[in-house]
Image (cartoon, helix red, strand yellow):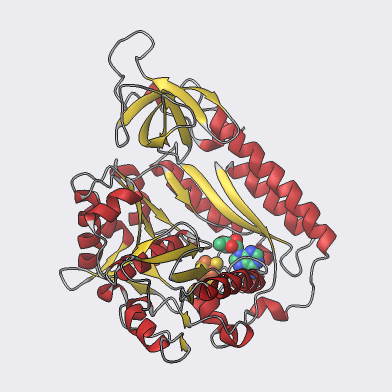
Amino acid sequence: METRLGAMKKVHIKSFGCQMNVYDGQRMADILGEQGFEETATPEGADLILLNTCHIRERAVQKVYTELGKLRDIKTAQKAQGQDTRIIVAGCVAQAEGAEIQRRQPAVDLVVGPQAYHRLPELLEQARRKRIVDTDLPVDDKFGHLPAPRAQVIRKRGISAFVTVQEGCDKFCAFCVVPYTRGSEFSRPVVQVMIEIERLAAAGVQDVTLIGQNVNAYHGEGPDGRIWGLARLMRRVAEVPGIARIRYSTSHPRDMEDDLIAIHRDLPQVMPFLHLPVQSGSDRILAAMNRRHTADEYRRVIEKVREARPDIALSSDFIVGFPGESDADFEETIALVDEIGFASSYSFKYSPRPGTPATDLHEQVPAAVMDERLQRLQARIEHHRQAFNHAMVGRTVEVLLERAGRHPGQLAGKSPYLQAVQIETDANQIGDRVQVVIERAGSNSLFGRKAGAADGSMPMPAQDPSTQPASAKELAA
Ligand code: 5AD
Ligand code: SF4
């Protein structure tokens, strides 16, 4: 790649969307790092600009073209100054749009789908001569070809890390584009995942989230030649020295097997947090969505999870206004939200994704009705989130300190329930796990002091059951 003489080559990576994209962005930074690129925070001045796109949100494609228009202007301006700029479009929009991207925006040099990242150096080389599109969805294992991040890079990224263990989805929910953009389910072999996690832990990472579009469908090849499920993989991860906290996301209710539920009871490293999207509380809509479970089956899974870990923080995704959703269907969603008392949730208005079966359904819900339903749903979700957070006040929780707080003398971290917590402390540093008495719940963070700090005594042990939060259901009541 052309560059100014003597200067380091710079790459700017902008990732949209989910955690998997953030992870992919980091792995592309690792592979480009090996090619002599260092990351830069702005597109201006970069030799290479990489848009790591996401297809899941409404108007995602349109937003990419708008963004590309801005990048073309930067490319043109830099060209006038004698600097070459290359533009890469990666991620799910790249996969879905393919060659159309370069047709609509000729400034783009390379279009690369999520399964071809390991080939970036070679594709970049080819893109010097002609515009390139690589959106094959091969079955070969891209992860096996990606370089491991260097310890120094891991440290810069912090003490929490995502690790993709699974990719793609075979569920084919009627609204969802993932099975088409990310392809069918693939699970990384256990050994490969373990090497990555051991490397992260050796560089100081304490908190890992195993991610995948349908992570609890994980079925990777084990070192014994057998297929391992997610529960077995997590038991192995929990043995890695230094790994204090483990989470996994995103799960499908159908794949919440009993052995996975059991690890919430058995493994102290597995955090009491579960993101388990239900999408709707109506059986009719769940069937139309091809979710392959009923609302009661979801309730039963939640019951079992709460039996294993009564204090677990639950989270979900919801879609309002799926074609054919009646007022009564929507009321069932509200009833489910109130019954379960989620600690947090995401909610979206349905919007058609080209190529998905739901686009052929005719009974579209009017926009005004969707707006109203979304508002009502979000108000209930927010009510339960606040209730969950406020019920923490007076309790003692372990906080993993991750970064400087908002004000001098403050450090910020996360509770086991994935809540942001700020504490005043001079005696601690990033990476410490401290027992914190929660004193106040703000709208987005909890505030507390170190346990025992007020009277100078030693911190309380974490296991004292009287200091543990009640179940989310009780809290939300
Ligand atoms: N319309 C609205 N929301 C969607 N999601 C996925 N596809 C669509 C769509 N076509 C939401 C689902 C999913 C989350 C990641 O995004 O709730 O769980
Ligand atoms: Fe999409 Fe999740 Fe359904 Fe798979 S399980 S099709 S990723 S919504």
Q: Nearest the camera: 299 or 65?
A: 65
Image point 43% across, 75% down: which residue? 114
Residue 219 in view here: no
Q: Position of residue 22 (x, y in %)?
A: 44, 60
Which quadrant does the N terminus fall into? bottom left
Please tell me whether residue 177 is drawn above or below residue 138 in the rendered image. above
Which quadrant does the C terminus fall into? top right
* Quarter holding residue 340: top right
Q: Position of residue 223 (x, y in %)?
A: 16, 68
* Quarter holding residue 395: top left
On screen, residue 338 versus residue 117, left or right, reads right
Please tell me whether residue 386 is drawn above or below residue 113 in the rendered image. above
Q: Nearest the camera: 17 or 429?
A: 429
User: Which residue of the protein is positioned furthest toward the top in this rendering?
Assistant: 455
Q: Position of residue 57 (x, y in %)?
A: 62, 65
User: Which residue of the protein is positioned furthest toward the left in this rendering?
Assistant: 224
Q: Nearest the camera: 29 or 301?
A: 29
Please tell me whether residue 206 is drawn above or below residue 288 in the rendered image. above
Residue 152 in view here: yes
